[in-house]
Image (cartoon, rainbow, N blue to C red):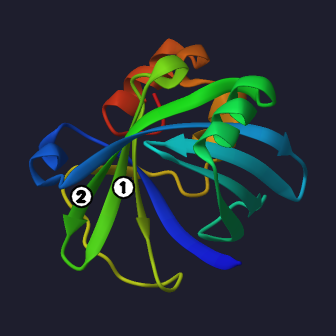
Amino acid sequence: MTLEIERKFLVTGDAWRRDAIACAELRQGYLANTATSSVRVRAAGTEGWLSVKAMRAGRSREEFEYAIPLTDALALLDEFTEGAPVEKIRHRVPVGRHEFEVDEFQGANHGLVVAEVELDHADEEFPRPRWLGDEVTDDARYYNFRLAREPFCDWPADLRAAVARGGRHP
């Protein structure tokens, strides 16, 4: 088990692209969501993972993650997940001693761009590049399990427009 401590932000503009050092296409889905946990399967490149995360809002959550064969991950994604698949291109963007993961969502969540930074402790200071928009760490609408059930394409047009500008409210 690891304790995942992360902050999540909307993104404004494309300035982050010039500093991106790598990217990967990810596809994930949810096998189960309960009041206490979510169970996710993910495929990226030639790898697959099965993860169990505590279902808790905020900056830190317990997470168990296990590598599984890609063929198993793809079979689980195709046959056992609920809701829309969460498809995204994840870009790694170093900023100072930290690295942001900027997720450009595809498919049913196309148009949503979110940046996450993992921290060593909940109150850790980190650089805030100009392309960071509003913080959405505590807003469940931006959790991937929620995007599978309520994709960005179904959100009200005024909210989608505000998010595209880096704000969380119209």
Q: Which quadrant holds residue 86?
A: top right
SS under mark 2: strand
Q: Nearer the viewer, residue 122 or 40?
A: 40
**Local crowd at mark 1 within 10 Å, few (<14), some, or many (≥20)?**
many
Q: Could you tell me how far apart the alpha carbons at marks 2 and 1 are, in whole angstroms?
A: 6 Å
Residues tagged 2 and 1 counted as in contact (Cβ below 8 A): yes
Residue 67 horizontal/vertical position (percent): 62, 60
Residue 121 position (above or below residue 166)? below
Residue 168: image location, x then y, percent: 47, 39
Q: Position of residue 52 (x, y in %)?
A: 76, 59
Dividing the picture into quadrants, the one containing residue 73 is top right
Identify the secondary structure beneath mark 1. strand
- Tell me which label, 2 or 1, sits earlier in the chain: 2
Q: How many marks?
A: 2
Say what amino acid the circle numbered 1 marks.
Glu
167 and 6: which is toward the camera = 6
Q: Residue at x 44, y 25 (%)?
A: 106
Relative to 135, is 23 on the left or the right? left
- Residue under numbered circle 1: 101
- Mark sitting on residue 93: 2
Residue name at image x 64 percent, y 78 percent = 3
Q: Looking at the picture, which amino acid does disc 2 mark? A: Val
Residue at image location 54% in from the left, 16% down from the top: 153
Image quarter where the C terminus lies is top left
Left or right: 82 in relation to 119: right
- Residue sitting at 30 percent across and 67 percent down? 99
Residue 150 appears in view? no
* Pick the front one: 109 or 25: 25
Q: Horizontal and vertical percent for residue 167?
A: 39, 39
In the image, 96 versus 167, the foreground residue is 96
Q: Name the residue furthest left.
A: 18
Q: Is residue 7 above or below residue 3?
A: above
